[in-house]
Amino acid sequence: MSPCSAGRSTLTESPVSDGLLQTTPPVRIGRIRQVLLSGAIDAAMDLSGVTVVGDYLVLGADEGHRLQVLVRTLDGEHWTLEQTLALAKKDQEVDIEAITFGQGYLYVAGSHSLRRRRLKPELSVRKNRERLLDVGQQSARNRLYRLSFDPASGVLGKTEYIDLSKRLRKDPLLGPFTKLPSKENGVEIEGIALRDGRLYLGFRGPVLRDNYVPVMTLAFDRPKDYALSFVRLDGQGIRDFVALDDGFLILSGPVNDAPGPFCLWWWDGADQIPGKDRTVHATRWLGEVSTSGGASAEGLALLSEENGHAEVVLVYDTDNAAQAVRMQVDLRP
């Protein structure tokens, strides 16, 4: 049985419950507590991207179109909305999936995915069959943004973006998957991290045979010069990840709309395609961050890393409230 589906280290209460989260004590995940988010947060029940820059927490939602900057209060556990920035028109869905910061810039990844319409029980069978055949794409989803950001003042500056859809369609491996909707093993970017001046884009789908998940590495100013590497997560895709001192902390989940599980992994960042001329180090499973209430763990932000431990914030896609939790993760072998 896959360690990520073994049901270990599972949060036993939904993150939308009242009070702090309760958990069966995991080996590597602890000190779990609720993070309070206040203000008129855009698409608050669909949080999917998050990063922390000093005293600022930056949020995005996959059903919204605004980047949102919250400021930390004195107690350190409460963040209040300070400003927002529209990345597209109100009627467009940017599908913000991941956010990271480095070298004076925020980077925001759209999914670059196709979308099949959801079925609605209140409609007739004929109408739902029509919806089932309706697969669409919005150009606003096909963007990788770069925005200047001042960590001292929280001021957002110039916004620019590139579109990676052409690169994805022309890629010999990813190209066929660009014709499939997201959640059906089609191309969907859901993670972003920055290391040594290059962006790492993690894919929720496709997950390839033998469970290989693509990671695209590129420089924002030179997207043609990209590379693909692969990581194995026991059949799951990447929901988000963050760069660590000596690797990456990955949040994983199902490719489709299954309720979970959602897990954390440590990855050394090296391509895991095997061969007689390479030594591959397996990804290390750290624990499960699923909830009994069915909330989906979608975004991951690094607060600090010290002495083999990482302090992180996770944001969830929920049914009734904006939700984030803070936890400590033991990264040691």
Image (cartoon, grey):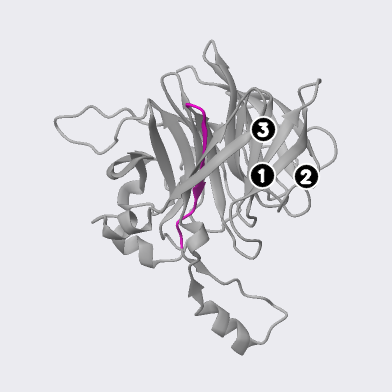
**On residue 16, which mark appears?**
2
Q: Are marks 2 and 1 in contact (CB under 8 Å)?
A: yes
Residue appearing at x 25%, y 39% in the figure:
273
Disc 2 marks a residue whose amino acid type is Val
Tell me if residue 269 comes above or below residue 201 in the rendering: above
Q: CA distance from mark 3 to mark 1?
A: 15 Å
- The residue range painted magenta reads 103-113
Where disc 2 sits, the SS reads loop
- Report how many numbered discs are placed on residues in the image: 3
Residue appearing at x 60%, y 27% in the figure:
150
Which comes sooner in the sequence, label 3 or label 1? 3
Mark 1 residue crowding within 10 angstroms, few (<14) / some (14–19) / many (20+) = many
Q: CA distance from mark 2 to mark 1?
A: 9 Å
Residue 233 visible at all: no
Residue 79 visible at all: yes
- Front disc: 3 or 1: 3
Q: Is residue 17 left or right of residue 162?
A: right
Tell me if residue 207 comes above or below residue 285 in the rendering: below
Q: Is residue 199 left or right of residue 172?
A: right
Q: Position of residue 291 (x, y in %)?
A: 68, 43
Q: Nearer the viewer, residue 266 or 142?
A: 142
Disc 3 marks a residue whose amino acid type is Leu
**On residue 316, which mark appears?**
1
Which comes sooner in the sequence, label 3 or label 2? 2
Q: Position of residue 250 (x, y in %)?
A: 49, 35
Disc 1 marks a residue whose amino acid type is Tyr
Q: Position of residue 97 (x, y in %)?
A: 54, 48
Which comes sooner in the sequence, label 2 or label 1? 2
Query: Residue at the right extreme?
Result: 18
Residue linked to disc 3: 57
